[in-house]
Amino acid sequence: MTNPQLSTEKPALDLLIAAPRGFCAGVDRAIHIVELAIQKYGAPVYVRHEIVHNKYVVDELRTKGAIFVEELEEVPDGYPVVFSAHGVPKSVPAAAQARGLSYLDATCPLVSKVHRQAERLVDQGRHIVFVGHDGHPEVIGTFGQVPDGAMTLIETVDDAEKFAPADPENLAFLTQTTLSVDDTADIVQVLQRRFPAIRAPRADDICYATSNRQAAVKAIADQCDAMLVIGATNSSNSLRLVEVAERQGIPARLIQRASDLDLAWLEGIKTLGITAGASAPEVLVPELVARLAEHYTITEREEETTRETVAFKLPRGLEAEAA
């Protein structure tokens, strides 16, 4: 008879890995812009705000010569600066130009699309209802595209119910690109019920990658006992993945990387779902699997819900470095 105290057999754990996951085209482009800027100008290259919300990515770029600052005033004269993927108010590139700084705009093209929509709607005389999270860099950047007072932030269904515009017949709504698809739909439903004339965007502002990653979590949630999301605590799209999993009825945790995992949380778990936010590099997924394999006998499989083929062009001036 085997003595259980002497047994070294590891417990079994099934891993169900969501796809798509991890980097989206906008994040991949932004990181590449910083790398090519360092290649073109030499180190250091300054980056206003984290290029994307992921510590691993930021630390890797630091080793290559990137210096991250919060405000343009922290960039010394004569050095190039890159604006983050989240977008910046118009005042930031204007200030860079006034100082004669070379700059590259790594704003995700899907965020830039929202900026252009905001400008057009204001030009048409419409007041914009913007669905998003207060203080998020993308929200700050979008509000900075239009005059003060031209846009109102709505964060919740309750906000939408209480909103009292001066001209209810002359409204339009836009949204942050990294929101919960379900939460946003609930808010939009309230706005459209209360203000039937409100103009919707030509296409959904929530980006393809955010929607796809949330759909992938929903697709595997009913097969999992719990879900781990790899991503940063200040990453909106990663936090939304945790919420999506919990809404499907399973416990979920956000971790930045494998070393952050409290193994006690996995007690009693037989099937573990794994995904990664759009700013989390793929290398962090096998790193997590490897750590789990130290403590469990693992079987793993991937469930892909859609294949992503989106790619964005680099800014002019970096083509030679990319060649």
Image (cartoon, rainbow, N blue to C red):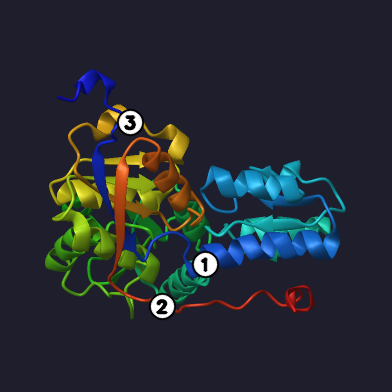
State whether residue 133 is above or below residue 151.
above
Residue 109's x, y, as percent?
52, 72
Of the two numbered discs 2 and 1 in the rendering, the one whose residue sits closer to the viewer = 1
- Give the residue number, with chain letter if any, for mark 3: 263
Residue appearing at x 17%, y 34% in the figure: 268
Figure quadrant of residue 84:
bottom right
104 horizontally vs 77: left or right: left
| Residue nearer the viewer, 205 or 147 | 205
49 horizontally vs 319: left or right: left
| Residue nearer the viewer, 115 or 283 | 283
The answer to whether the residues at label 3 and label 2 have Cβ atoms under 8 Å apart is no
Res 26 label:
1
Residue 152's x, y, as percent?
35, 55
Of the two numbered discs 3 and 1 in the rendering, the one whose residue sits closer to the viewer = 3
Q: Rounded to the nearest whole Å, what is the CA distance between mark 3 and mark 2?
A: 55 Å
Q: Callout 2, which amino acid?
A: Gln
- Give the residue number, with chain letter if any, for mark 2: 124
Secondary structure type for disc 3: helix
Q: Callout 1, which amino acid?
A: Gly
Q: Rounded to the nearest whole Å, what is the CA distance between mark 3 and mark 1?
A: 33 Å
Q: Callout 3, which amino acid?
A: Leu
Disc on the earlier residue, 2 or 1:
1
Disc 1 packing (10 Å; few <14; some 14–19; many ≥20): many
Q: How many marks?
A: 3
Q: Is residue 49 visible?
A: no
Q: Rounded to the nearest whole Å, what is the CA distance between mark 2 and mark 1?
A: 29 Å
Of the two numbered discs 3 and 2 in the rendering, the one whose residue sits closer to the viewer = 3
State whether residue 20 is above or below residue 264.
below
Residue appearing at x 24%, y 42% in the figure: 12
| Residue nearer the viewer, 126 or 184 | 184
In what quadrant of the picture does the C terminus appear? bottom right
In what quadrant of the picture does the N terminus appear? top left
